[in-house]
Image: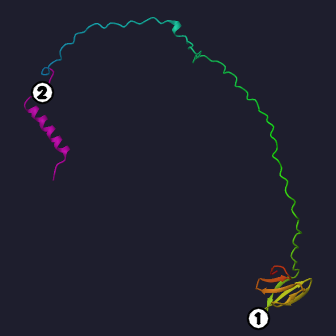
Amino acid sequence: MRPSFRIVAIVVVIAAGGYFVAHGLALDEASVPAPPPVAVTSIAEPEIAAIEMHALRPRETRDGRNLFAYREPPPKPVAQAVVRYVAPPPVALAEPVAVQPAAPAPTRFTWKYVGSFGPRERPFAVFSRDGEVITARRGERVDAHFVVKAIGVESVDVQPRNEPVQRIPLG
C-alpha cells in the first residue's frame, strides 16, 4: 500500500525537528545577523500654496455655459397648425342597373310530418294539419302542389312544382 503525500510530509518535518533538537542547533537572536543600520535623514515638508478664492467660483465658458448655475430653459416654439383645403374626390356616377324582379319565395309546406309506418320497401308518410291527418307514399301528391320524393325515419323530402326539394323534419 502506498502512503499518502501528507503522511510523508509530516514524517519529514518531525524528523527534521528532532535532528535540530538533538544536535543543539537552536535559532536564537544571537545567531541571526542584524540588518545594517539605516541613515535617518530629515524629510522636507512640501510647500502648500495659498488658496485663491476667485479660483473657487464657477466660471462661464466661451459659449456661456455654466454647469453649476440654474437658468430657465428657453420657451419651446409652438407649432402652427397648417390648414389645407382638400377637395373631395370626384364622384363617379354609376350606370343605371336594370332592376330584376325578386325571385318568388318558395312555396311553403304547411303540413306537419308526424312519422312513417308500413313496410321498409314502401313506407307511408303521415302528415297532420288542423286536426286533419293524411298519408302518402313516395311519388304521390300532397295538396296537389307537393310531391313526396323520399321518406325517412326523421324527415321527409317534398318538392313543389318547378322548385327545389324541401326537407321537412319530424315534429
What residue is shown at x 21% (from left), y 12% (from top)? 38
Dominant secondary structure, magenta? helix
Give the amino acid at mark 2: Ala
- How is the rendered protein coloured? rainbow
- Contact? badges 2 and 1 (CB < 8 Å): no
**Segment tinted magenta in the rendering:** 1-29
**Of 22 and 146, which appears nearest the observer?**
146
Q: The residue tagged with tag 2: helix, strand or loop?
A: loop
Q: Is residue 147 above or below residue 29?
A: below
* Residue 26 - label: 2
**Residue 119 numbered mark, or none:** 1
Q: Could you say whether the residue bearing mark 1 is in a helix, strand or loop?
A: loop
Residue found 15% across the figure and 41% down from its top? 11
100 relative to 19 in the view: left or right: right
Examine the image and state in which quarter residue 112 appears: bottom right
Residue shown at 80% from the left, 88% from the top: 116
* Residue at (87, 72) in percent of width and height: 103
126 up-or-down from 31: above or below: below
